[in-house]
Image: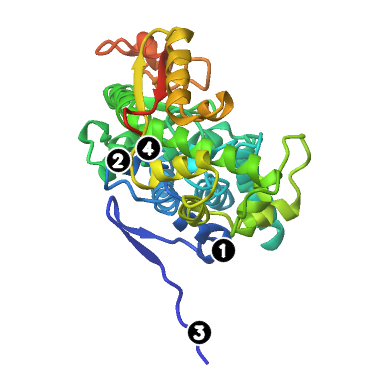
Amino acid sequence: MKRSSKLKIFNDPIYGFIRIPNNLIFDLISHPYFQRLRRISQMGLSYLVYPGAHHTRFHHALGAMHLMQEAITLLRLKGVAITPEEENGLLCAILLHDIGHGPFSHALENELVLGISHETLSLKFMEKLNREFGGALEVAIQIFRGTHPKPFLNQLVSSQLDMDRMDYLKRDSFYTGVAEGYINSERLITMLSVYRGNLAVDAKGVYSVEKFLMARRFMYWQVYLHKTGLVAEQLLIRVIRRARELHREGLLICNSGSLGYFLEQKDDGAEFTEVALERFARLDDVDVLAALKHWEQDDDRVLSWLCRMILDRRLLSIKIRDTPFPSERLEFKREELQQSTGFSDEEASYFVFGGEISNRAYNRQEQKILILEKNDKVVDVAQRSAHLNLEVLSHPVTKYYICYPKKGV
């Protein structure tokens, strides 16, 4: 019997048709590890603010791979040597760069799997897949680790102007409807070059880089760190913390075996085993949402209230400002809640808490964005930019918040 031809394209709302270049990429996309990304929200609980933000890590990974294909084609036209093996490594690395994300992406990072970043988990998945595929991902792993002898290959995957950021800014802007976050990724890619082994941008592309950095700054403060999304994700974190506490005491039933496995995990620095990786590979947003629905009816008032707040979008009040809040204000709100509910001090702390958020659009301590001048010299974009003061954007901005129940809760 003649084998049916494999699907070669995806229809993407951002870029149109995305081509699958070879069977290895097709088989990686078809693998259960990657298909799991269909069930991992790209933007956590941001859909409680922007109703259209229901896109997934699956969408983003395919989009980033598409941009990588465009970048490879462009750089080769400019005479940059990229071998077929390196091309395949780039495409595999960018396709799998987020495969280690857990439920609701960044919202629960370091919370469900204690002390392990999604980058570390992505690498573990890539190493496991490499064994399954007979060593086909060796170059991809080198690029992902940053150990490949050509630095620009890693910089295309992970830097301050990589295909990952180009896609998520454009995609998140599209799905949230926030036009200020839109970037012209096509022009940015057209302006890419390589100087002495490092990624650079042609001088005439400096304004596109400025727009990219401004869009990133806007998206962080207006979308990714939006106060409503922030308080929703803080509540979700506290659901997991309360559930872990009750589960370890034998006071909570968890219907998801994978979720229950990580609720039992202790922050003891133990090695993340192959068993743990397989458990994590079965864990996604569905497990957490189902748990919220189940625990909403739990006898523990703290857990029940936290779950109901998220499910019904009856969130805590949140105040944000540029200076820290006095501890007396938090203490007053906590005592007020205790008097009205009978909660203990520890229980009240789940609903009254403070914290801080920070961001900077351009980090000059990391791999800089290099502008390639006509005299064949490179300069940091923050020094080259005349239109915007990127020196200011390179400094971190920190804000402080407090959260507490609304009246009548």
Element on which disc 2 rests: helix
Residue 32: give its label. 1
Q: Which residue is under mark 4?
A: 166
Identified by mark 2, the residue type is: Glu
Q: CA distance from mark 2 to mark 1?
A: 31 Å
- Say few, some or many: other residues with alpha carbon within 10 Å of mark 4 (under 14 / 14 to 19 / 20 or more): many
**Disc 1, SS:** helix
| Vertical placement of residue 373 versus 324, above or below | below
Q: Earlier in the sequence, mark 3 or mark 4?
A: 3
**Residue 3 marker:** 3
Who comes first in sequence, dot 2 or dot 3? 3
Dot in front, 4 or 1: 1
Left or right? Give the position of 211 relative to 281.
left
Labels 2 and 1: the sequence-earlier one: 1
Identified by mark 3, the residue type is: Arg
Distance Cα–Cα, label 1 vs label 3: 21 Å
Residue 356 visible in the displayed image: no
Q: What numbered label is drawn on residue 58?
A: none
x and y, in percent, of residue 65 in the image? 44, 50
Query: Residue 101, how many percent across, how many down?
Result: 54, 45
Judged from the image, the secondary structure of the residue bearing numbered disc 3 is loop
Left or right of 275, for residue 152: left
Question: Crowding at label 1, few (<14), some or many (≥20) Cα neighbours within 10 Å?
Answer: few
Which of pointers 3 and 4 indicates the residue nearer the eye? 4
Pointer 1 or 3: first along the chain:
3
The x, y position of residue 174, in whole percent, is 26, 43
Residue corresponding to mark 2: 186
